[in-house]
Amino acid sequence: MNVYFYELNSKTARADLAALEQSLKSSPSVVSTRLLQSLEQEGLFLLIVEAKEKPALLLPENCRVWSFTSPA
């Protein structure tokens, strides 16, 4: 299982990542999603996605992405 982190820091970050989350929920490779809000920085949100493979997405501008998997 792979984990993808989508970070966005903007006035519309919450809405942008929530829309991205909704589109991901229909993907058969996506197992789970979770949207988090920073406790320290206003406007900073993180969407965590567990998926079998990296989703092909049109990302919001300035969205940073990290990809992780369990070590072998």
Image (tube, grey):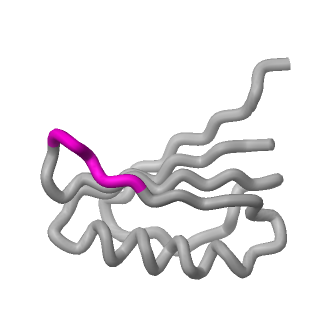
Give the left or right position of residue 29, taking residue 68 as reference.
Answer: right
Q: Is residue 39 magenta?
A: yes
Give the left or right position of residue 64, taking residue 41 as reference.
Answer: right
Q: Residue at x 45, y 59 (%)?
A: 35
Q: Residue at x 36, y 75 (%)?
A: 16
68 or 48: nearer the eye?
Answer: 48
Residue furthest to the front in view is 39
Q: Position of residue 60 (x, y in %)?
A: 38, 70
| Quarter placement of the N terminus | top right
Magenta: main secondary structure:
loop
Q: Position of residue 64 (x, y in %)?
A: 40, 50
Q: Residue at x 18, y 58 (%)?
A: 43
Q: Is residue 43 magenta?
A: no
Give the left or right position of residue 40, taking residue 3 as reference.
Answer: left
| Quarter placement of the C terminus | top right
Residue furthest to the top in view is 72
Q: Which residues are magenta?
A: 36-40
How many badges with numbers are in the image?
0
Q: Is residue 61 above or below residue 71?
A: below
Q: Is residue 61 above or below residue 2?
A: below
Q: Position of residue 18 (x, y in %)?
A: 43, 74
Q: Position of residue 32 (x, y in %)?
A: 68, 59
Q: Residue at x 73, y 43 (%)?
A: 2
